[in-house]
Image: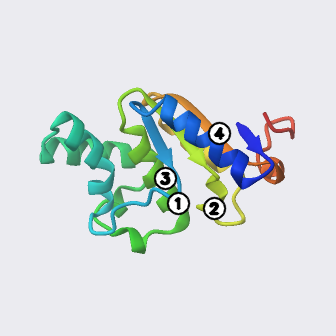
Amino acid sequence: MRFFDNEDALRTSLDAFMSEHRTHLGLVSLEVPLISSLPVWGNIALIRQYHENMSWANSRTFVSDLLKRFDMTGIADRRTFLLKMEELFCVMLLRAATVRGAVVVLDRPFLLLPKDRDSQFIMDALRKIDDLIAEAYIFDYSRAIGLYRATDGTAD
């Protein structure tokens, strides 16, 4: 986790990090929305279809298996505007994790999640896809440290 006192510091560090890891970057951010004209499964499959020429049938199966990890197979054909905030976050996370050797970056994830969520939801989601990702980082403001509690009640 990386915490910053202001927007400029966060943006500067995030931009440098993204530049350094651009070939394997999987970004989860409000600034990188899902494609509204695609269903959930299409948004998740897009990276593998584009970069690896994964067929429609194989990508559909691939995404279905990923959605099963989150007990969300029922949303595969929904458009993004019909998703709950938690579902949107998970779909964006799954899309990011489909980058081969993904270095997943969560850019201020609580902007995507309801106020009653805490870091446990994020950590649980990351655990469900840990076999797909090489590394995961969270970029957020210092004032959000309290939202990231570890088992001992402190932030990492």
Nearest to N terminus: mark 4 or mark 3: 4
Identity, as a three-letter code, of the amino acid under mark 1: Leu
Question: What residue did someone put label 3 on?
Answer: 90
Identity, as a three-letter code, of the amino acid under mark 2: Leu
Nearer the observer: mark 4 or 2; the answer is 4
* Tag shown at residue 151: none
Nearest to N terminus: mark 1 or mark 2: 1
Q: CA distance from mark 1 to mark 2?
A: 7 Å
Q: Quadrant of the C terminus?
A: top right
The residue lying at 41 percent from left, 26 percent from top is 101
Q: Closest to the observer: 74 or 39?
A: 39
- Residues at discs 1 and 2 in contact (Cβ within 8 Å): yes
* Tag shown at residue 30: 1
Nearest to N terminus: mark 4 or mark 1: 4
Identity, as a three-letter code, of the amino acid under mark 3: Cys
Question: What residue did someone put label 2 on?
Answer: 111
Query: Going by the image, does 79 lie left or right of 61?
Result: right
The residue lying at 79 percent from left, 52 percent from top is 144
